[in-house]
Image (cartoon, grey):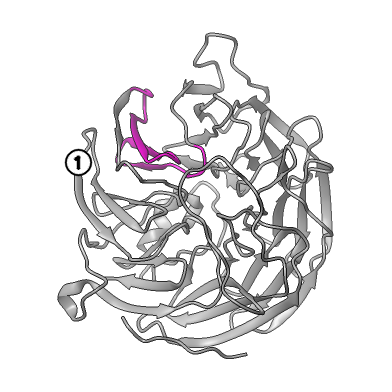
Amino acid sequence: MSFTRRSFMKTSLMALPAAAFNYAPEQNWPEFRGPGARGVAEGFATRATWNVNETGKDSGVQWRVAVPGLGHASPILWKDRIYLATAVPKEGKASLRIGYYGDVGPAQDNDEQRWMILCLDKKSGKTKWEQTIRTAKPVTVRHEKASHANTTLVTDGKHLIGFFGGDGLYCLDLKGKLLWQKDLGAINVTWRSIAWGYSSSPALHQDRIVLLCDDPKDPFLAALSLADGKELWRTSRKGACESSWGTPFIYNDGTRTQIVANGYPYIVSYDFETGKELWRLRGGGDIPVPTPFVADGLLVLTNAHGGKTPLFAVRPSATGDISLEEGKTSNDSVAWSVPNGGSYLSTPVVYSGYIYLANHNGVVRCFDFKTGEKMFEERLGADSACSASLVAADGKIYCPTEQGVIYVLKAGPKFEVLAKNDLGEPCLATPAISQGVLYFRTSASLMAIK
């Protein structure tokens, strides 16, 4: 089905460092936060300033197109194409309430939706194809700040995988043909009876898809065949996790392949082949959202809420219960930790020896990644709220705020704002980067900043 557009402007991760993939000529960004979920793209210059209200090469805007409906799914890129998920209500416009507030009633838009996959040309933003994969009333409600398409697609260059919790798992080819679909039943991801909405993106490695489905009534992790969606194994997370919203992280260090899943009360690692638990770490934050990833040979793990905001750097060789003793910040498996240094919604980024975190209240922290020593803690702005995750390139840290202002920080141990760029629309989706171009998805648009 068509809609009107405004023309205004993996191979295995294995032991290879994720940065190695970023130097490919096409510089693919195939999943949430790019290769290895690290949020880093090097080898090309990127802009610090731009102006979406101007046209011409000096504005920095290569193109900008309207996106129908509402979705917080991040754009992914493979070669010369961009792929994006969205949910379009049958009638009216989907509501979105940003900022930091205490009341948590669900959005009143549980009428029929169209879940769509869009494919756009990387250089021009023009639509190459679009596919409606589901038309129905959502299985679960959403939070006023969420959408019915929170999750990011993932591709291996042949298949395109989208998972929307209770609204289904879908596998397409890169021309938009639906190859198969699977219904995993209602997945009502709640927190103490509050419906936040599903947001765990699918993970893809070799010949299988990994899904994290932490419905408090029946939390589980599952591996499915990429070829046909057949379930290969399912591991219950009862006793390990009450609920979580992060994307599972698959990592091969040359010795074993593990799946690391954020959670409360435990962050847990599972064997990729069997689903058997490998290790667990007592976390702290009771609404775990950030996605695990590896940087400089260490697993980066964080979560927050409920007074606890831990940040951990964990050795991938960990086994058993690696939880820290009271008052300790390290052990044989935990290289270092900061009891109150973590983030709530946003996934951190490690870049040039430092780790940067943006919290929901607009506070940005920086730590030395070798030691965990705090370098700075500063607030971006009085009204800033951060949900999208940080990304880094060309000596810069890009920090989106829900209000649509992108703060560009100079990478390093001192807090220095290089620029503030207003996109003009709310931004809750994590940016993508490829060949020096930044791709921002807002509440209504997708834009390329060159």
Q: Decide which of 158, 33 is in the foreground and name it.
A: 33
Q: Is 128 inside the magenta-drawn segment? A: no
Hey, what amino acid is under mark 1? Glu
Residue 175 in the image: above or below residue 138: below
Residue 158 is situated, as x and y percent measured from the top left of the image, at: 60, 75
Magenta span: 344-373
Name the residue rendered at 49%, 20% in the picture.
339
176 vs 440, nearest the viewer: 440
- In the rendered image, the quadrant that contains the C terminus is bottom left
Q: Residue furthest left?
A: 58
Position of 81 with respect to 89 (left or right) is: left
Give residue 241's quadrant in the image: top right
What element does badge 1 sit on?
Answer: loop
Horizontally, residue 295 falls left or right of residue 270, namely: left
In this rendering, the answer to whether 193 lies above or below 223 is: above
The quadrant where residue 379 appears:
top left
Relative image position of residue 255 (x, y in whole percent) = 61, 39
Nearer the observer, 163 or 20: 163
Examine the rendered structure and indicate whether residue 412 appears above or below residue 436: above
Residue 122 visible in the picture: no
| Residue 335 x, y percent position in the rendering | 48, 23
The residue pinned by badge 1 equals 416
Give the total of numbered labels: 1
Does 191 sit above or below residue 332? below
Confirm whether the magenta stretch covers residue 347: yes
